[in-house]
Amino acid sequence: MDQDVKPFIDRAKITDCVVRLARGEDRRDADLIRSCWWPDATYDYGVQSGDFPSYLAWVVPGADAIKDTQHVLGQSHIEWDDGKARVESHVISYHRVDMGAGDQDVCIGGRYLDLMEERDGEWRISERIMLYDWYSEWGDAIDWARGVMGYPFTAEHFSGRAVGDFSEKFFGES
């Protein structure tokens, strides 16, 4: 491959991996998550750390108290190092959490620091550290039965994953 083009293709593969992982985490989809990490990978989220099997067991099925999540990714800074890449990706993650007094909406802003490795042309995470920049509690979660801003929904699937994930049907996933 032309060495001038390879960094662009590698950047796209790395970005696709990070995006695919966020989608897998939001759906607690073990296969999608597994496709983003090397089996010998490690992680440190400050509140939980270990090897990839312990990460998968932590994220899937996830805590009963955390009912919904959404990870919104920002820019990624990538630096190359001989078949490896150091990647910093900004993330804002929303969580609907039962903190004992009913569902609450919380939001975390931070960055993933990923060491990614290319093996047989595929980029995956070999090490991840989560840095936390801010945290905000937004209060009581909305009651989707009332729609949005007083307007009722015309179908159940508009309330996101609260009633199943319509995007899986949209993409033809089972």
Image (spheres, helix red, strand yellow):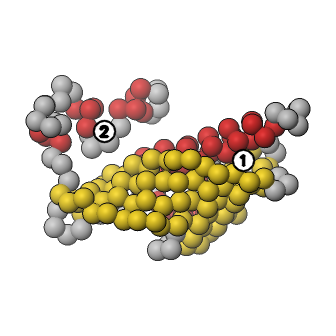
Q: Is residue 134 above or below residue 168?
A: below
Name the residue carrying label 2: 160
**Camera-nearest residue between 16 and 163:** 16
Q: Is residue 167 above or below residue 119?
A: above
In this image, 120 relative to 146: left or right? right
Q: Where, by quadrant of the figure, is residue 138 drawn?
A: bottom left
**Camera-nearest residue between 108 and 161:** 108
In this image, 125 relative to 61: left or right? right
Which residue is painted at 57% across and 70% down in the image?
A: 44
- Circle 1 packing at 10 Å, graded few (<14), some (14-19), many (20+), is many
Picture mark count: 2
Q: Position of residue 104 (x, y in %)?
A: 23, 60
Q: Position of residue 174 (x, y in %)?
A: 45, 33
In this image, 105 relative to 109: left or right? left
Dot 2 falls on a residue whose secondary structure is loop
Mark 2 or mark 1, which has the lower sequence index?
A: 1
Q: Position of residue 112 (x, y in %)?
A: 56, 59
Image quadrant in which the N terminus is located: top right
Name the residue carrying label 1: 123
Which residue is painted at 64% across and 59% down in the image?
A: 114
| Residue with the most extreme right position | 2
Which residue is painted at 75% across and 37% down in the image?
A: 8
- Circle 2 packing at 10 Å, graded few (<14), some (14-19), many (20+), is few
In this image, 111 relative to 81: left or right? left
Amino acid at pointer 1: Trp
What's the mark number on residue 61?
Answer: none
Amino acid at pointer 2: Gly
Q: Position of residue 139 (x, y in %)?
A: 20, 60
**Camera-nearest residue between 49 and 54:** 49
Q: Is residue 137 above or below residue 31?
A: below
State how far apart marks 2 and 1 are (Cα): 30 Å
Q: Is residue 97 visible?
A: no
